[in-house]
Structure formats: structure tokens, C-alpha cells
Amino acid sequence: MLKTFPKGGIHPEENKITSSKAIKRMPVPKVVYVPIAQHIGIPAEIIVDRKDKVEIGQVIAKSGGFVSSNIHSPVAGTVTKLDMIVDTSGYKKQCIVIRTDQKNESNFEIPDFPLKKEISMDQKNILQQITDCGIVGLGGATFPSHVKLDLKNDNHVDCLIINGVECEPYLTADHRLMLEKADEIIVGIQILMHALHINEAIIGIENNKKDAIKVLKQAAKSDKRIKVAALQVKYPQGSEKQLITAIVQREVPIGGLPMDVGVIVHNVGTIFAIYQAVQYDQPLIERVVTVTGKKIENASNFWVRIGTPIKDLVEEVGGLPEGTRKIVNGGPMMGKAIKNTDVPVTKGTSGILVISEDEASRQDPKNCIRCGQCVFVCPMGLEPHLLMNLSEKGMYEKAAYEDIMTCIECGSCSYVCPSHRPLLDYIRFGKSIVKKINTTKN
Amino acid sequence: MADPIIISASPHIHAARTSEKVMYDVLYALIPAFLVSIYVFGIRALVLTSVAVISCIVFEYLIQKYLLKTESTITDGSALITGILLAFNLPSNLPIWMIIVGALIAIGVAKLSFGGLGYNIFNPALVGRVFLLVCFPVQMTSWPTAVENNWSLVDAVTGETTLGIIKEGLMYGETMSTISEKIPSTMELLLGITSGSVGEMSALALLLGGIFLIVRKVITWHIPATIIVTMAVVTGVFWLVNPEQYANPLIHILSGGAILGAFYMATDLVTSPMTKKGMVIFAIGIAIITVVIRLFGAYPEGISFAILIMNAFVPLINKYFKPRRFGNQIKSKIV
């Protein structure tokens, strides 16, 4: 019996159309739009000005605090504007517009980094390098990685978990990366183990990626400290808390962090970025993006420079198909619907999903029939129907008492509801109010 | 682009399971039991069920249109299910007008006056049945005997149910060993060749539909399994203590409305608890109340009362038996 998390979960259709498509390199775009808030926390501070010439990988916005991250120029070129553009959140955010220098050869060299196994840096420098290179969690949450690695609070961490679950339907970016960069990922894990003095690392992969499990097991053979755990296919296993219970059967307490149970979790994409940062001083300026959809002609996976407009990607796969009604940045369960394709790819963009007419609209909500499905599928042991009612009626204190803040917004409740009730919409709303109440209280 | 791009919050996909589909699964699950009752009671079963279904739907339509002035919900299948379940709980020779009264109480009082689908506290079909049982006890407890009066519409020979025979026999001082000669065999109970309400005939057919519901994930095993096991345990204890005074657990489970109640009535989504822990508590309550009524009460059968009584406790059960919150009790091995 394969491991999985014990409570709740759903099995949406996988639709991993692009799992056999090797990662292609997107051509460097003519113009990049680099938002300064690509991570959770304080936005970075712009340190370039209009008309400045920038080199590839040069810091263009500096980390604005501890929970923040540097942002580097993804191309060599000229800063044309400091503008406000709509990003994936749907709000206008500050961003640096850079025109690519078509004559600068560094833009078009395909970076070729042969596997480098020897780790020469010491612990302190590794952590500094991760901070400097602007590494954030590439699984989608974009939490600055150096914050997770800062263990000064005397936390005893004994296990590093690598998240290769990719439980979102459609997305295959992590899957392809594991297949194509298995050795580099293993070195990346060794770097972190070295830096944090951890002697055990477990890579969690769902069993629908048998090839990746095989490849990584092979790659990890030489290092007995690194194990690969095949997991049952169940959404939302890629959620940090669920993954930890699935692999080491430890439960992160309410309001706590993985560190509290002696675990650190990093996504495979992040590990690869750390490998490149430490071994080749390569800042985070590109990532793997799955561009997919049932009607997309040439759905595939791409290496994409940060700041590339999504329309360039859509163009690359054959344009928006007839009847497109929704474009999602991310997977279908947790991704954000975007208004148009001018939005740029950021550090958190794991996929672009194009949804057509038949699946784009929601059905009208009906009365709750109290079937309890939402309760059964909630991985956090919450009662979504109750939380929705409390939020709807403005009973926020009661909602807080019913642990509304522990909701991970995985969307399983809304997914199963036979009455199509917008459970998560109301819970999100309730959470935002409860958060406000809590901040004013303190 | 002709149509605008839709912006909505995640999730962007849905299980494509609707309340209607859930209702129709229940409908399919009731087909085997319905076929058995047509075989046993002939055209009467068909007439009774059609009258109950049509009156439920018509009452729902009329009340929503003229009294409540709300949107009609007759297409969601719930009134249809209520009609069928009501019919399944009635004797097949009940006068037509009584069926209509039962349907009015079920839909008008038990369902719509509480706010319609999802808001009712009590199982509508059972409220209808219990109302009729209290108002018309004679008609509600004279069941036509099985098979012999197949396909005739005239008033037939009536007989008593298995539980009725046992209750009466024991009251007049008979012992189980003499009574057991008068009641149907276990096999007959399983197949449904016996007297009783329309749908409670064949335990086997009902089990078949019940398993279908569990496989289709309309219901979980918690309520039916707990009811049956608890009933078996409680009646088993009495039977072991005095087998001459108490019927054996198998008779209790296979006769009367136990299986119908456990799989179809107690599991009604709206009126049962929403957590698995709660469901088990709810089911234990039903089983114990049923057995108490059967063994010590005035009525030979009590599962309808038991379910209605426990229905009233559901809000309380939901409040006190919550799922365990993730991360609430830390049982993990922290190093």
C-alpha cells in the first residue's frame, strides 16, 4: 500500500497531456515585464532607472526585507519604463519593463551547465547564495527560500522533504524537470543537506509519475541518505502539510510551521534553482512552465524567462483555440484566472491552462443538501458548509473559532459540492475578514 | 474574441456531480425492490407508487407556485424520491385518498414549510407515513397477503406482518417456538414473499440497491452497517437470555422496515449527520430505539419513529461530533 495523507482528498481527472513533452526553450522575448512583487512578503525595491542598460542576471530590484527576495534581469537590454501593469492577482502592480538588446549575444546563448557534483561552498555561503540569487518556492507559493532555511530559532530539523508530487491536474513542469534534471536535483538536495546538517532527505512523488520515480531512484543510488517515496495519487498531496503527514506521519500543529515537527519542504523546481545558484552562480531568471489545455494544439513544457508575456507562450503552442473562455495562471484547482494574455510569467507561474466554453462557466448554486461531501474531502478536517454559512452571515468570530484560518484553499470542497455551492469563495472572504480583525486586535 | 474571458476564483474544475444525479442514483437503487413488490402485490404496488409520486410532485409544484411564490424545484428529483419512499412505507391496499393526504403532509408540512430541500429536519416520507399511521391505524396495519392476490384491484385478503404476528403471539402468552411455525421462513423474508409495506418486502433486493448506493458513493456504509450491527447485538442479547420470549436477530433484521430504514430512510442526506462519527452515533440511536419499540412498545415496528426521533438530534450531533481538525492534537513523533 502506497503512502498518502489520511484525511480527505479528491481524485480529479489528471489530464496530464504534456507529460511526455520534453521541456523546450522559449525564444527570448523582445520585451520583458518584470513585476517587483513576485513572492510572498515585502515587494522588492527597484534599483534601476529608465534608460539604464542592464546585463543578464543583474539585480534590478533589491530584497525589501527579511521576507522578500532579489529580482534579477532575465535579459540583457535597456530599461524602457517603470510601469504599473496588471499581474496575475488582477491588480495593477509595479513592474520593470526591459527591451531586449537583440545584438547582445548573451541573450541568445543557450546556458549549458554540465553536471557539477562537488560542493565547494560552505554552509554560510550557500545560504547567502540562495538569498542573493532570489530563489523562492517554485511550487506556486513563492515563499522566499532563504526564510525557510533560516534555522536560528533552535529548531531541530532532521528531515528534508522534496516535493515532487505535482498533484494539480494538467501541470507537468515538475514531472519533466525530474526526468530531465534528476542528477542535478540530487546534487541540489545534497547542497541543502550539507548546509543544514540534515542526514535524511525524502523525495515524494505520486505514483502516476512512475518514470520519474525510477529515474530519481537511480540517481539517488549513490547517496544512501536520499530516498524516494512513491505516493498514492490524491489531491492535495502537494500541499506542504499533507505531504509531511503522507511521508513521515507528522502533523504540523495549527498555526505552526513544518520546522515545528522537524521538517523542511522544498519543491523540486526550487531544488534545481538552488543547484544552479550554488554551483553556477545562476540567479533565478527562468523557470519551467507547462502550457496546456484540452484544445491547445501543441501543448508542451517550456523553459521561460521571467517576465515573458503569456501571449508569447500561447503563440508558441498555436494560439488561443476557438471558444476559449478562461485562461488560468497555474493549475485548475488553485490557479488564478487572468483577464488577458498580457500578464507576464513570474517566479510562481507553473503553468498556463486554457479552458474552453464547456468547462469555463460555473453552474448556478443550489440549496445545500447537507450531504457532507465537503466535510469528507476537506484535508484539514474543517466543515466547509459551516464556514461558508458563517462567512455569508457575517459571523466571523464564530468562523475563526471553527478554525477558518487553517483552510489551505485547496478547493476540494467546491470541487465536490453536488449543489455547486461556492464554498471556497465564501471561506476566502471570511478568512480575509478574520485576518483583518486579528491584525486590528493585536 | 466574441465571448468575454471569464474571471472566477479557483477551483476551475468540478466533479460534475450534481444533486440531481445523486437523486437519480437513489432512484435506480430502488428499482430492484420495486420490481419485487410489483411481483408480490401486482398492479396495486404500481398504482400506489404512481399516486404517491404524482401527488408529491404536484403538491410541491402547487405550493411553490401559489403559496410560497418561489422557483419550482420539482425537477431536482427530490419530490420524486420522497414519493417513492412514502409509497414504499405504505401497505399496498391503502385507499388512494389517504396516499394523497400522506403526500401532502410529507411535502407540504415536512419539507416545504421548513424551507424546502436541504432545510427540512425530519425525513419527509417518514413524516407522511407516521402521520397516516397515527390517523388511520387500521388501514395502515392491514397488509394484503403476498402473491395470492397478484394483479387484482379488489380488496384482498389481508394478513399481518412477521413482526405483528410475533408481537401478538407473545402478548397472548405463546412462545417463540410455536410462533415460528406461523411466520415466514428466513428465505421467504430474504426474497420478500411475505406481508408488509410495498417496499419493505425483499431484504435481498433492498440490500442490492443499498450496495449500489454505497458503490456510487451516494451514501457511506456507516449508517446502514451500524444500524444492522447494533440491532443484531441488542436483539441478540435478549434472544440469548430468553429465546422463547424474543425473536432471533436474523428475524429482526430481515423483517419489517429494518433494511429499508437503514439503507434508504436513515441515510437521507438532508436529515442525517454530516460527519462519520456523527453518523455512527445517529445509527446506534436509531437501532436502540427501534429495538426498544419492537420489544416493549405498543407497535410491532418502530424504525420510522426511531429515525424521526434521531432526526431531531442531528443538529446537536453535528455540533458536538466534529471532524478532528488537522494539527489539533499532535500525536506525531516529534524528535
Image (cartoon, coloured by chain):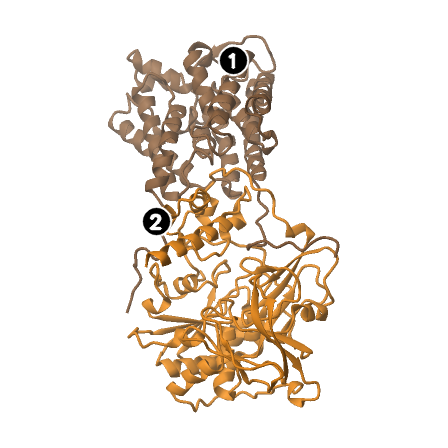
Chain colours: A orange, B brown
**Which chain is home to disc 1?**
B
> Is A105 left, or right, of A273 in this rendering?
right
> Is B63 left, or right, of A200 in this rendering?
right
Label for residue B332? none
SS assignment at label 1: helix
Three-letter amino acid code at the position of disc 1: Met
Determine whether label 1 and label 2 are within 8 Å by CB.
no
> How far, Cα to Cα, is label 1 from label 2?
49 Å
Displayed quadrant of residue A347: bottom right
Q: Position of residue A318 (x, y in %)?
A: 74, 67
Residue that numbered label 2 is attached to: A401
Please say whether residue A101 is visible from this viewpoint.
yes
Q: Quadrant of the C terminus of chain A?
A: bottom left
Residue that numbered label 1 is attached to: B98
Circle 2 crowding by C-alpha within 10 Å: few under 14, some 14–19, many from 20: few
Q: Nearer the viewer, residue A57 or B280?
A: A57
SS assignment at label 2: helix
Q: Nearer the viewer, residue A292 or B149?
A: A292
> Is B335 left, or right, of A124 in this rendering?
left
Q: Position of residue A195 (x, y in %)?
A: 38, 83
Three-letter amino acid code at the position of disc 2: Tyr
Displayed quadrant of residue A315: bottom right
Displayed quadrant of residue A441: bottom left
